[in-house]
Amino acid sequence: MKEQLVDKIITTISISTWVYYWEPLKEVLEKIANAGYLNVEIWADKAHLDPTIAPDILMVKNLFRNLSLQVHSLHAPFSGVNVAALDEEYRKCSLSLIKKSIEFCSELEGKIVIVHPN
């Protein structure tokens, strides 16, 4: 019983791609896999899965599969995003980016999206 609990804890430890935000996603995921991680949080704020640049989700999904990694969560953009903005156009644009991030996470079979409402 104790070993099962330890195994469950170890398999749910995740690392964020933010630790290598300046490197291309492929290289980051290879480093993460080589370090022995199984679960990953993808950083989508101006890096890796930035919804403003329409990333190739199928390529990312295949990359995760080939490296035996799993998307645990996706950190939605927060720089320049404000879902509580009084300016209606700004708020709509912010919501659109958050929605795209949620869709990316779903397509990659992630379970959690982190959102900062500002």
Image (spheres, rainbow, N blue to C red):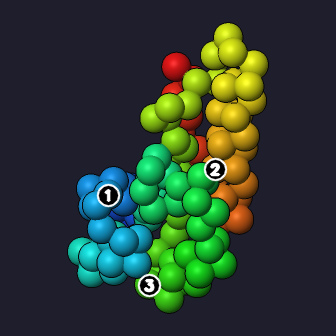
Percent x, y of residue 98: 65, 40
Mark number displayed over residue 101: 2
Mark number displayed over residue 53: none
First in residue order: circle 2 vs circle 3: 3
Which amino acid type corresponds to the residue marked 2 in the rendered image? Ser
Report the front residue among 50 and 6. 50
Percent x, y of residue 114: 53, 39
Circle 2 — which element?
helix
Q: Residue at x 56, y 75 (%)?
A: 60
Q: Residue at x 70, y 50 (%)?
A: 100
Q: Residue at x 50, y 32 (%)?
A: 80
Mark number displayed over residue 67: 3
**On the image, numbered disc 1 is attached to which residue?**
21
Quadrant where the N terminus is found in the figure: bottom left
Q: Is residue 61 above or below residue 77?
A: below
Q: CA distance from mark 2 to mark 1?
A: 17 Å
